[in-house]
Amino acid sequence: MKIIPLVIPTPFYVGAVNVYLIKEEPLTLVDAGPKTADAADALREKLRENGVRLADIKRIVLTHAHEDHCGLAKQVRDEARGAEIFVHKWETRHLFGRLVREEHKSLLLRAGVSETVFGEIQSLYADVSLLTDTLSDGEFSELKDDTELEFATGILKVLHTPGHTPGSCSFFREANRTLIAGDSVLKRITPNPIVSPDPIDANKRFKSLAEYLVSLARIRLLAPTLIYGGHGEPIYDFEEIFHRYVRSIDERQKNVVALVSNDGATAFDVAQQLFPQATGRDVHRFLAISEAVAHLDYAESQGKIAVELKDGVEFYRKI
Protein backbone atom coordinates (compact mmCIF):
# COMPACT_ATOMS: atom_id res chain seq x y z
CA MET A 1 0.00 0.00 0.00
CA LYS A 2 1.51 3.31 -1.10
CA ILE A 3 0.66 6.33 1.07
CA ILE A 4 1.71 9.61 -0.56
CA PRO A 5 1.62 12.91 1.37
CA LEU A 6 0.34 15.88 -0.62
CA VAL A 7 1.14 19.23 1.01
CA ILE A 8 -1.71 21.65 0.27
CA PRO A 9 -1.68 25.40 1.10
CA THR A 10 -4.25 26.89 3.48
CA PRO A 11 -5.05 30.48 4.48
CA PHE A 12 -4.81 29.56 8.17
CA TYR A 13 -2.06 30.40 10.65
CA VAL A 14 -1.26 26.69 11.06
CA GLY A 15 0.09 26.64 7.51
CA ALA A 16 -0.18 23.88 4.92
CA VAL A 17 -2.33 20.81 5.48
CA ASN A 18 -1.31 17.25 4.64
CA VAL A 19 -3.67 15.37 2.34
CA TYR A 20 -2.83 11.70 1.77
CA LEU A 21 -3.24 9.81 -1.48
CA ILE A 22 -3.62 6.07 -1.02
CA LYS A 23 -2.39 5.00 -4.44
CA GLU A 24 -4.14 1.68 -4.59
CA GLU A 25 -7.59 0.69 -5.75
CA PRO A 26 -9.96 2.13 -4.84
CA LEU A 27 -7.93 5.35 -5.16
CA THR A 28 -8.51 7.22 -1.92
CA LEU A 29 -7.81 10.66 -0.49
CA VAL A 30 -7.52 11.05 3.27
CA ASP A 31 -8.72 14.65 3.76
CA ALA A 32 -8.99 17.13 0.91
CA GLY A 33 -7.78 20.60 1.93
CA PRO A 34 -9.70 23.91 2.20
CA LYS A 35 -12.06 25.22 -0.46
CA THR A 36 -9.75 27.79 -2.05
CA ALA A 37 -8.56 28.14 -5.64
CA ASP A 38 -4.93 27.75 -4.52
CA ALA A 39 -5.69 24.54 -2.64
CA ALA A 40 -7.72 23.07 -5.51
CA ASP A 41 -4.96 23.88 -8.02
CA ALA A 42 -2.29 22.42 -5.74
CA LEU A 43 -4.30 19.24 -5.19
CA ARG A 44 -4.79 18.71 -8.92
CA GLU A 45 -1.11 19.37 -9.64
CA LYS A 46 0.19 17.05 -6.92
CA LEU A 47 -2.16 14.30 -8.00
CA ARG A 48 -0.99 14.79 -11.60
CA GLU A 49 2.64 14.46 -10.46
CA ASN A 50 1.68 11.04 -9.10
CA GLY A 51 -0.10 9.93 -12.25
CA VAL A 52 -3.61 10.47 -10.87
CA ARG A 53 -6.43 12.73 -12.01
CA LEU A 54 -9.07 14.14 -9.70
CA ALA A 55 -11.61 12.20 -11.75
CA ASP A 56 -9.86 8.95 -10.75
CA ILE A 57 -10.58 9.35 -7.03
CA LYS A 58 -13.09 6.80 -5.73
CA ARG A 59 -13.16 7.59 -2.03
CA ILE A 60 -12.61 10.64 0.23
CA VAL A 61 -12.02 9.74 3.89
CA LEU A 62 -12.07 12.59 6.41
CA THR A 63 -10.07 12.56 9.64
CA HIS A 64 -12.34 15.34 10.91
CA ALA A 65 -14.55 18.12 9.64
CA HIS A 66 -12.46 21.27 10.04
CA GLU A 67 -12.30 23.48 6.99
CA ASP A 68 -8.61 22.95 6.25
CA HIS A 69 -9.22 19.19 6.07
CA CYS A 70 -12.70 18.79 4.59
CA GLY A 71 -13.26 21.97 2.57
CA LEU A 72 -12.73 20.47 -0.88
CA ALA A 73 -14.41 17.12 -0.19
CA LYS A 74 -17.66 17.95 -1.97
CA GLN A 75 -15.87 19.48 -4.96
CA VAL A 76 -13.59 16.44 -5.28
CA ARG A 77 -16.61 14.14 -5.06
CA ASP A 78 -18.41 16.03 -7.82
CA GLU A 79 -15.37 16.23 -10.12
CA ALA A 80 -14.66 12.54 -9.52
CA ARG A 81 -18.21 11.74 -10.64
CA GLY A 82 -19.56 10.52 -7.36
CA ALA A 83 -16.64 9.44 -5.18
CA GLU A 84 -17.89 8.35 -1.77
CA ILE A 85 -17.22 10.59 1.26
CA PHE A 86 -16.64 8.93 4.65
CA VAL A 87 -16.70 10.73 8.02
CA HIS A 88 -17.56 9.81 11.61
CA LYS A 89 -21.16 10.62 12.57
CA TRP A 90 -20.01 12.74 15.53
CA GLU A 91 -18.57 15.27 13.06
CA THR A 92 -21.93 16.22 11.58
CA ARG A 93 -22.28 19.38 13.68
CA HIS A 94 -19.15 20.69 11.94
CA LEU A 95 -20.29 19.47 8.54
CA PHE A 96 -23.47 21.50 8.74
CA GLY A 97 -21.71 24.73 9.76
CA ARG A 98 -19.63 25.93 12.70
CA LEU A 99 -21.17 27.80 15.64
CA VAL A 100 -24.52 28.07 13.85
CA ARG A 101 -26.62 25.99 16.23
CA GLU A 102 -28.19 27.22 19.43
CA GLU A 103 -26.20 24.71 21.50
CA HIS A 104 -22.93 26.32 20.35
CA LYS A 105 -24.10 29.68 21.66
CA SER A 106 -25.28 28.11 24.91
CA LEU A 107 -21.88 26.50 25.52
CA LEU A 108 -19.96 29.73 25.02
CA LEU A 109 -22.36 31.85 27.09
CA ARG A 110 -22.05 29.26 29.86
CA ALA A 111 -18.26 29.73 29.62
CA GLY A 112 -18.66 33.43 30.43
CA VAL A 113 -18.57 34.77 26.89
CA SER A 114 -20.80 37.80 26.42
CA GLU A 115 -23.45 38.05 23.70
CA THR A 116 -21.29 40.67 21.98
CA VAL A 117 -18.15 38.52 21.96
CA PHE A 118 -20.12 35.48 20.83
CA GLY A 119 -21.51 37.52 17.93
CA GLU A 120 -17.98 38.51 16.92
CA ILE A 121 -16.74 34.91 17.07
CA GLN A 122 -19.78 33.62 15.18
CA SER A 123 -19.32 36.27 12.49
CA LEU A 124 -15.68 35.31 12.09
CA TYR A 125 -16.52 31.63 11.72
CA ALA A 126 -19.25 32.45 9.23
CA ASP A 127 -16.40 33.70 7.02
CA VAL A 128 -14.23 30.67 7.83
CA SER A 129 -17.11 28.36 6.94
CA LEU A 130 -17.01 29.71 3.39
CA LEU A 131 -13.86 27.58 3.00
CA THR A 132 -15.93 24.40 2.95
CA ASP A 133 -19.14 23.10 1.41
CA THR A 134 -21.60 21.79 3.96
CA LEU A 135 -22.78 18.21 3.49
CA SER A 136 -26.40 17.23 3.84
CA ASP A 137 -27.73 13.98 5.29
CA GLY A 138 -27.21 11.24 2.74
CA GLU A 139 -24.14 12.89 1.18
CA PHE A 140 -21.65 10.91 3.25
CA SER A 141 -21.09 7.43 4.63
CA GLU A 142 -20.29 6.78 8.27
CA LEU A 143 -16.88 5.82 9.58
CA LYS A 144 -17.19 3.36 12.45
CA ASP A 145 -14.57 2.48 15.03
CA ASP A 146 -12.71 -0.82 14.52
CA THR A 147 -14.03 -1.28 10.98
CA GLU A 148 -11.77 -1.61 7.95
CA LEU A 149 -11.20 0.33 4.74
CA GLU A 150 -10.35 -2.29 2.16
CA PHE A 151 -7.86 -1.84 -0.67
CA ALA A 152 -6.63 -4.19 -3.38
CA THR A 153 -3.69 -5.48 -1.33
CA GLY A 154 -4.32 -4.33 2.22
CA ILE A 155 -6.54 -2.60 4.73
CA LEU A 156 -6.61 0.49 6.93
CA LYS A 157 -8.29 0.02 10.29
CA VAL A 158 -10.56 2.87 11.41
CA LEU A 159 -9.79 4.17 14.89
CA HIS A 160 -12.12 6.65 16.53
CA THR A 161 -9.68 9.02 18.29
CA PRO A 162 -11.85 11.80 19.78
CA GLY A 163 -10.34 14.86 21.43
CA HIS A 164 -9.42 17.49 18.89
CA THR A 165 -13.02 17.07 17.74
CA PRO A 166 -15.64 14.55 18.90
CA GLY A 167 -15.51 12.53 15.68
CA SER A 168 -11.78 12.67 14.89
CA CYS A 169 -10.59 9.42 13.32
CA SER A 170 -7.20 7.87 12.57
CA PHE A 171 -6.36 5.06 10.17
CA PHE A 172 -3.94 2.27 11.03
CA ARG A 173 -2.10 -0.15 8.77
CA GLU A 174 -1.19 -3.03 11.03
CA ALA A 175 1.18 -4.62 8.50
CA ASN A 176 3.83 -1.95 9.07
CA ARG A 177 2.31 -0.07 12.07
CA THR A 178 1.71 3.11 10.08
CA LEU A 179 -0.93 5.56 11.33
CA ILE A 180 -2.63 8.44 9.53
CA ALA A 181 -3.67 10.56 12.50
CA GLY A 182 -5.12 13.83 11.20
CA ASP A 183 -4.76 16.48 13.90
CA SER A 184 -4.68 13.98 16.76
CA VAL A 185 -0.88 13.80 16.61
CA LEU A 186 1.29 16.60 15.23
CA LYS A 187 5.06 16.88 15.18
CA ARG A 188 5.61 20.43 16.43
CA ILE A 189 2.41 21.58 18.13
CA THR A 190 0.01 20.13 20.67
CA PRO A 191 -3.45 19.72 19.11
CA ASN A 192 -6.10 22.12 20.41
CA PRO A 193 -9.19 20.52 22.00
CA ILE A 194 -12.12 22.40 20.44
CA VAL A 195 -15.17 23.22 22.58
CA SER A 196 -18.08 21.22 21.15
CA PRO A 197 -21.53 20.02 22.16
CA ASP A 198 -21.60 16.44 23.36
CA PRO A 199 -22.64 14.21 20.43
CA ILE A 200 -24.93 12.16 22.68
CA ASP A 201 -26.56 15.07 24.54
CA ALA A 202 -26.16 18.44 22.83
CA ASN A 203 -27.12 20.26 26.02
CA LYS A 204 -23.88 19.04 27.58
CA ARG A 205 -20.28 19.86 26.68
CA PHE A 206 -18.00 17.27 25.12
CA LYS A 207 -15.15 16.54 27.57
CA SER A 208 -12.48 17.00 24.94
CA LEU A 209 -9.26 16.82 26.97
CA ALA A 210 -10.24 13.70 28.92
CA GLU A 211 -11.24 12.00 25.66
CA TYR A 212 -8.03 13.15 23.98
CA LEU A 213 -5.87 11.57 26.69
CA VAL A 214 -7.72 8.29 26.21
CA SER A 215 -7.11 8.52 22.45
CA LEU A 216 -3.40 9.17 22.98
CA ALA A 217 -3.17 6.12 25.24
CA ARG A 218 -4.94 4.02 22.63
CA ILE A 219 -2.53 5.15 19.92
CA ARG A 220 0.39 4.40 22.21
CA LEU A 221 -0.80 0.81 22.65
CA LEU A 222 -0.53 0.36 18.88
CA ALA A 223 3.19 1.23 19.05
CA PRO A 224 3.16 2.98 15.66
CA THR A 225 6.51 3.22 13.92
CA LEU A 226 5.37 5.97 11.52
CA ILE A 227 2.64 8.57 12.00
CA TYR A 228 1.39 10.87 9.27
CA GLY A 229 -0.15 13.96 10.88
CA GLY A 230 -2.48 16.57 9.49
CA HIS A 231 0.26 19.22 9.47
CA GLY A 232 4.04 19.12 9.42
CA GLU A 233 6.51 16.30 9.06
CA PRO A 234 5.99 12.56 9.63
CA ILE A 235 6.61 11.27 13.15
CA TYR A 236 8.96 8.36 13.78
CA ASP A 237 9.27 8.81 17.56
CA PHE A 238 5.73 8.77 18.95
CA GLU A 239 6.92 7.78 22.42
CA GLU A 240 8.86 11.03 22.69
CA ILE A 241 5.87 12.99 21.32
CA PHE A 242 3.56 11.23 23.79
CA HIS A 243 5.67 12.20 26.79
CA ARG A 244 6.04 15.77 25.48
CA TYR A 245 2.28 16.06 25.16
CA VAL A 246 1.71 14.71 28.68
CA ARG A 247 4.27 17.14 30.15
CA SER A 248 2.69 20.03 28.27
CA ILE A 249 -0.81 19.10 29.44
CA ASP A 250 0.35 18.72 33.05
CA GLU A 251 2.04 22.12 32.94
CA ARG A 252 -1.05 23.74 31.42
CA GLN A 253 -3.19 22.12 34.13
CA LYS A 254 -1.05 23.71 36.83
CA ASN A 255 -1.27 27.12 35.16
CA VAL A 256 -5.03 26.90 34.72
CA VAL A 257 -5.69 25.81 38.30
CA ALA A 258 -3.46 28.64 39.56
CA LEU A 259 -5.63 31.15 37.70
CA VAL A 260 -8.80 30.00 39.48
CA SER A 261 -9.42 32.26 42.47
CA ASN A 262 -11.41 31.70 45.64
CA ASP A 263 -13.92 34.25 44.37
CA GLY A 264 -14.49 32.29 41.18
CA ALA A 265 -13.54 32.65 37.54
CA THR A 266 -15.24 31.80 34.26
CA ALA A 267 -13.56 29.95 31.43
CA PHE A 268 -13.48 33.23 29.50
CA ASP A 269 -11.69 34.91 32.44
CA VAL A 270 -9.10 32.14 32.50
CA ALA A 271 -8.65 32.24 28.71
CA GLN A 272 -7.94 35.99 28.81
CA GLN A 273 -5.30 35.52 31.51
CA LEU A 274 -3.82 32.38 29.97
CA PHE A 275 -3.59 33.85 26.46
CA PRO A 276 -3.58 37.66 26.77
CA GLN A 277 -2.30 37.94 23.21
CA ALA A 278 -5.34 36.05 21.87
CA THR A 279 -8.06 38.54 22.80
CA GLY A 280 -8.34 40.09 19.34
CA ARG A 281 -11.10 39.37 16.88
CA ASP A 282 -9.61 36.32 15.18
CA VAL A 283 -9.75 32.53 15.51
CA HIS A 284 -7.18 32.58 18.31
CA ARG A 285 -9.77 33.93 20.73
CA PHE A 286 -12.07 30.95 20.15
CA LEU A 287 -9.12 28.55 20.37
CA ALA A 288 -8.04 30.18 23.65
CA ILE A 289 -11.54 29.75 25.09
CA SER A 290 -11.60 26.13 23.91
CA GLU A 291 -8.25 25.42 25.58
CA ALA A 292 -9.38 27.00 28.86
CA VAL A 293 -12.70 25.13 28.86
CA ALA A 294 -10.99 21.79 28.14
CA HIS A 295 -8.50 22.21 30.97
CA LEU A 296 -11.08 23.49 33.46
CA ASP A 297 -13.34 20.53 32.67
CA TYR A 298 -10.46 18.14 33.19
CA ALA A 299 -9.26 19.81 36.40
CA GLU A 300 -12.81 19.68 37.79
CA SER A 301 -13.13 16.00 36.89
CA GLN A 302 -9.88 15.32 38.76
CA GLY A 303 -11.13 17.09 41.89
CA LYS A 304 -8.65 19.97 41.60
CA ILE A 305 -11.31 22.70 41.41
CA ALA A 306 -15.08 23.02 41.87
CA VAL A 307 -17.68 24.48 39.52
CA GLU A 308 -21.09 26.02 40.10
CA LEU A 309 -23.70 27.41 37.74
CA LYS A 310 -24.91 30.92 38.50
CA ASP A 311 -27.37 32.71 36.23
CA GLY A 312 -26.45 30.38 33.38
CA VAL A 313 -22.69 30.92 33.71
CA GLU A 314 -20.17 28.44 35.12
CA PHE A 315 -17.84 29.75 37.84
CA TYR A 316 -14.80 27.72 38.87
CA ARG A 317 -13.37 28.00 42.39
CA LYS A 318 -10.51 26.56 44.35
CA ILE A 319 -11.43 23.70 46.66
Image (cartoon, grey):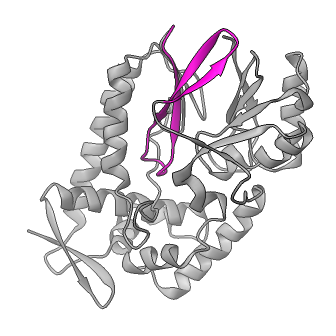
Magenta run includes residue 29: no
Quarter of the rendering occupied by the N terminus = top right
What residue is at 35 percent from the left and 35 percent from the top?
245
Q: Where's residue 218, x and y in %?
A: 34, 30
Point out the residue furthest to the bottom here. 311
Residue 299 lies left or right of residue 112; in this view the side is left
Number of on-image labels: 0
Where on the picture, by quarter, is residue 73?
top right
Left or right, 271 with reference to 156: left
The image shows residue 54, relative to residue 275, as above or below, that is: above
17 with respect to 92 (left or right)? right
In the image, is residue 208 above or below residue 248? below
Point out residue 43 in the picture as x, y percentages from the top left corner.
83, 33
Question: Is 228 or 1 nearer to us in this picture?
Answer: 1
Q: In this view, does 205 lie above or below 186?
A: below
Q: Residue 170: x, y in percent?
A: 52, 32
In the displayed orientation, state which residue is furthest to the left: 319
Locate residue 244, reporting x and y percent: 34, 31
- Locate the C terminus by quadrant: bottom left
Left or right, residue 137 beside residue 239: right
Question: Looking at the image, which residue is at 69% across and 12% down?
Answer: 2
- Highlighted magenta segment, given as a residue range: 147-175
Work out whether 179 lies above or below 209. above
